[in-house]
Amino acid sequence: MKKKRALPVEAKTLSRWQQDCVRLKLSLVTGVVLEGRLAGYDQYMLLLEDAETRAVYKHAVLCIEPEPARAESRTPRPGTVTVRTRRRRLSGASATQSVTAKLRLP
């Protein structure tokens, strides 16, 4: 049987930041600071999107700081529909349930 390989922490984190459209602040080893959203990444590069798209080599990145998560500051990617329902009490339980779904449009 084949063992299922776990994704590296880097790939999980970058993927989550890309899907959630989190604003990032990249500090480069040269002292330059770039800000924007992660448009894509591969083994060697990050694509940072703001007014323009910039390709940054990973070996040039000193530090990546995500912006604190605030619901009102997030803007969904084009073609993404976010559906939220009201919280409701579960019958006989003290817990509440909240449903969030993201749908990709063709």
Image (spheres, rainbow, N blue to C red):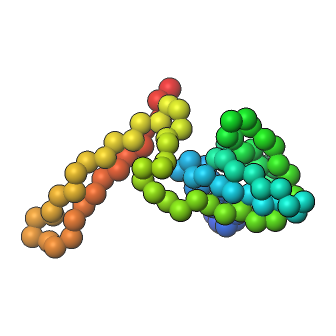
> Where residue 22 sits: x, y (%)?
57, 52
Q: Is residue 59 visible?
A: no
> Where residue 80 sits: x, y (%)?
47, 36
**In the displayed image of the protein, which residue is found farthest to the left?**
92
Name which residue lies at 53% across and 32% down: 78
**In the displayed image of the protein, which residue is found farthest to the right?**
30
Quick check: 62 left or right of 21? right
Quick check: 85 left or right of 102? left
Name which residue lies at 64% across and 47% down: 37
Q: Quadrant of the N terminus?
A: bottom right
Name which residue lies at 62% across and 61% down: 66
Q: Is residue 33 visible?
A: yes
Nearer to us in this view, 103 or 18:
18
Q: How many marks?
A: 0
> Where residue 21 sits: x, y (%)?
56, 47
Residue 16 placement: quadrant? bottom right
> Where residue 32 sits: x, y (%)?
83, 56
Name which residue lies at 34% across and 42% down: 83
**In the displayed image of the protein, which residue is found farthest to the bottom?**
94
